[in-house]
Image: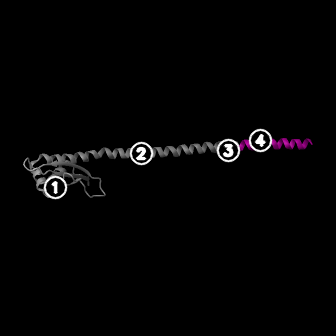
Amino acid sequence: MDKVNKKMKKMDKMDKINKTNKMNKRGWIMIIEAVIAVLILFSFVFIAMAKQSQEAKALEARPEFYNIAQILANRAEENDKLRGYVIEGDIDKLNDSLQEDIVQINPRLEMDVDVVAITENCEYDLVEKEIYVADAIIATDTETFEPKKLCVFVWEK
C-alpha cells in the first residue's frame, strides 16, 4: 500500500508539474501574440502617417498652380489687347499670348483658355491630369454690356 501511495503522490506531483509547464507555455504564447498584435497595429499607424505626409507634401506644391492660373486671368483682364481677344472670341491669339507668359513663369506647366458666357461653368476635358482653373469676367464697354467669362486652365506637363 505504501508503494501505491508513493506512486500516487509521484503522479500528483507530475500532474502538477505538467499543468504548471502548460500554464507557463500558454503565458508565453499569449505574450508573443500580444507583441505581434501591437507590431501589426503600429505598422498600420506608421503606414497611414506616411501616406498622409506624402499627400500633404503633394498639396503644398499645388496652390502655386492655381495662383499662376489666377495671374494669367488677371493679366488678360488688365491688358487691353488681351481683353480685345476675349471680346472678339479670338481664342487662338489669346492662347498664344498667354502661352508666352506661362513659359516665362513656369516652363513645367501647360495651359489653355476658353471664353464662355458668364452663366456657364469653366469645363475642360483632360481626364488624366489635375487641372487648375481660374476665371475672369470681362465686359466689352459701357455702351453694350455683353460680358464674357475667360477660363484659364493650367496643368503640369
* Label 3 neighbour load within 10 Å: few <14, some 14-19, many 20+: few
Residue under pointer 1: 95
87 and 46: which is toward the camera: 87
Q: CA distance from mark 3 to mark 2?
A: 37 Å
Residue 95: image location, x then y, percent: 16, 55
Magenta highlight range: 1-22
* Label 4 neighbour load within 10 Å: few <14, some 14-19, many 20+: few
* Amino acid type indicated by mark 3: Lys
Helix, strand or loop under label 3: helix
Residue 25 is tagged as 3
Q: Main secondary structure of the magenta part?
A: helix
Badge 2 or badge 1: first in the primary sequence: 2
Residue 19 counted in the magenta span: yes
Badge 3 or badge 2: first in the primary sequence: 3
Q: CA distance from mark 1 to mark 4?
A: 90 Å
Q: CA distance from mark 1 to mark 3?
A: 76 Å
Residue under pointer 2: 50
* Amino acid type indicated by mark 2: Ala
Q: Nearer the viewer, mark 1 or mark 3?
A: 1
Residue under pointer 4: 16
Residue 61: image location, x then y, percent: 29, 45
* Label 2 neighbour load within 10 Å: few <14, some 14-19, many 20+: few
In the picture as drawn, the residue positioned furthest to the left comes out as 143
Residue 74: image location, x then y, percent: 17, 46
Q: CA distance from mark 2 to mark 4?
A: 51 Å
Give the residue at x 83% y 42%: 10
Helix, strand or loop under label 2: helix
Residue 120 is tagged as none
Q: CA distance from mark 4 to mark 3?
A: 14 Å
Q: Nearer the viewer, mark 1 or mark 4?
A: 1
